[in-house]
Amino acid sequence: MSPPLASHHEHLSGSELAPSHTPQAPVYDVALGGSALPIQKSIEEEPQSFSAEHSSAESKASSSQQSVENERDVAQIDGLVLPTLPVLGPGEYALALPVEGKIQSVYSDIIKSKKKAILKFLNRHDSVGSANGSPTRTQERIEMMEMIQQLNDTVTHMDLGLPGTFTQYSIQSEAEAAYANYAGSKFSLLGHLVDMLAHVECSIVVMSQAGPVQDLIEQYLKLKHITVRRQDRAITLSSSEVERSRNEFQVELVSTFSTCQLAFPMKPILIIAFDASFDSQDPQVMRIRQYFSPRPPTLLPVVHFLVSNSSEHVDRCLPKDMPSPSRLKLLVRATYQARPNLGGRPTYVPDPSDEPEGRAMDMADLQRGLRKTPERKLAIFAQVITRASLALDWASNWTLPMPQLQLTDMDLGPSRSSGVPTMAPTPQEPIRSRTPASRSGTPSGKRRMLDVDSVLPALIKRQRLTPLQDSAEAATKSEPPNDQLQQMQELVNKLQADLQTEREAKQKAEEERTRIQEQLEKWKEDHANLQRRYEKRMTKCHELDFSTKKLQKIIDNNKSRQERTAEDNVSLKRKVAELQAELTTVREEVKAGGGDAAALEAAREEARGLQAKNVYLEKSLENTRKDFEFTRTQYQEASNKAAEFAGQVQELETKVAELTQQAGDEKRRLKEQSHTYSLQKHFAKIQELELGIHSREVRLKRLEEENRQLKRTRGVQTRGSSVQPPGSPNLDGPGRGTRSRQASPAAGLFSNTHHAAGSNRGSLLRHQER
């Protein structure tokens, strides 16, 4: 046993997963045509003799005869007991896998969307062996098979069960591997298994249906850096690659029902049935199991990955040789009953990491442990598979029992033999019998009551008759009592009201269905848009991840290069210091030795000092020259700026002078214009006054002329000479003289007859213009 496996040996022998009693062979119903060997018997007695195979063949023949009998007798189908353990052959083993909550939700949504069709399909009681090829029955069976396939795809990978086109993920990000672990427990178990076998020189065969499932498996394993070989693709490898592939772990992907030629560079130790499409009776599978058997005549072990209480779990429990309609109905019924228990009941696998430090476990710690339990179960399953695969005896190392199906009760509603809907029973008032009153004492056992259901069609038909026919028919028969006719009329009215209510309810239901269909179309459109946005965002995220990793790699390379350069500089400086110290020591020794060598060394030292001083002076001179050049450049720039500023000042002064001159001229011009405007205004006023004076003078002259004319024609008039009413006192007395204004009003002034007389004269001054 390898160290990784030995470290988890205690967990494998725990009470949660290890069998606590000796398993017994399950009992199968003969009516189901069960011909497969019990699972525990196939595990314990792998070496099979020819007689056992012969007896198995005989049992299959008898089961076929029993299936024919079942086709003749339909009533026995619904009364059969469904097997609760998978039907497995020799060398086949099954695992009940848990699932995540999101997969349970998608799985349940698929069944809910098909609930009406499921109940309608299960309520059919057509003969299994009858040649009922109506399009409705065929369409129902096709719909149920499509639903089962969709459920199988959902428990394999969550994205396969969702509507829309499946998206191929990029293999450049390891986040997709984590998503595959979340989207399907089969991928998580396969990941644990390949991690444990990654350093073992062996290979395993993973069989699944061709298409998206194999693409997902290939991408997932490549993300985990596992060598994957697709048998449905021709791959040309060099001799070195073939030699290397023989020395490392690899996975062989084989399509179920494939007829292509297979070639395995390394002998496989295990076959994994990844989905429900695996068939152990397939010739290709039989050849692989027989040819690569570790100990003939035993077969190569097969492990079925089954999600607990799923449609594929139910399908594996049903024998393959059952009649197809009966098997499909049992499969749909058991799948519907097992849907609440998808993934099995929640259990807790303890782990030391769940226990907090310094205190006892509480409910929150237990909930965290429960959330981690499915992944721990999968890790334990992978450990058991690895240990059994590497051991000489598979059956003795297989310690994982297969739980039974967990089915719930199901109410299919009222059974109907035909598709014609029957009328729901309506509460009705008691109807009097047509028999005479003398039969009221007849015993109830001999009395024949009126059947309401038989009356309803007759009443409905009578509504179509004309009044004349109705009256003629009534005349030929005995006339019933009036109260009975009234009750029947009320019954008809009530039924008509119920019919109208049903029509309104049907119309409302159709409107609701239309509204829901529109919402569904809108949801599909929004989902498609969201899916496109998600794909674009994922593509962009992958590109950003790739760019980030590339930049991070460049940064790491630059850092390592800089560190190496710094280390080289430090080592070189240290070597230079050591060489200088050694050179100084040698020179001191030469000086201390005396003779010509000492004098020569002293001269060289003096020359070196002078040379160093010369270098220093040259450097100082160069710095002084640079400072002078910098100062000269600054001075030149300042001179240029001063000249430029002087030119700008001169331009500004010229502009100021021009503006000043323009301001003086403008002031003078404005004064002249104001004076001219004032003169024009006064002249206009004078002319206006002169015109007014002239008009007044003309008017005055005209009035004076008129006044002179009046005086000329009338003479001197006084108020006393004006017309007075006759008989006025003291007016005609002596000494009064003539009256004033005797000619007022002038004769002919008024054209009417009232003022025509001389005694009724008016004053002309009243009518003159004043």
Image (cartoon, rainbow, N blue to C red):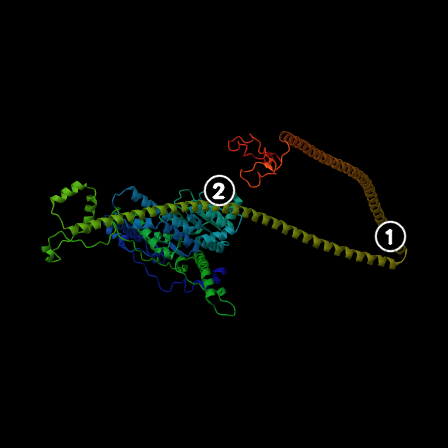
Residue 695: name its quadrant: top right
Eye-nearest disc, 1 or 2:
1
Residue marked by disc 1: 613
Residue 96: name its quadrant: bottom left
Q: Please state if 564 lies on the left or on the right of 618 as rendered.
A: left
Q: How many marks?
A: 2
| Pick the front one: 149 or 513 | 513
* Percent x, y of residue 260: 41, 42
Q: Please state if 256 lies on the left or on the right of 565 as rendered.
A: left
The three-letter code of the residue at mark 1 reads Lys
* Percent x, y of residue 315: 35, 51
| Pick the front one: 480 or 506 | 480
Q: Please state if 16 lies on the left or on the right of 133 as rendered.
A: right
* Percent x, y of residue 51: 30, 53
Q: Is residue 125 visible?
A: no
* Vertical order, 646 against 300 (above or below): above
Residue marked by disc 2: 235
Q: Residues within 10 Å of mark 2 (few under 14, many from 20)?
A: few
> What secondary structure is found at the residue carrying circle 2?
loop
Please give the name of the residue rendered at 78% of the width and 55% of the height, measured from the top-left corner: 579
* Vertical order, 406 against 511 (above or below): below
Question: Which residue is farthest front?
Answer: 734
* Vertical order, 545 against 705 (above or below): below
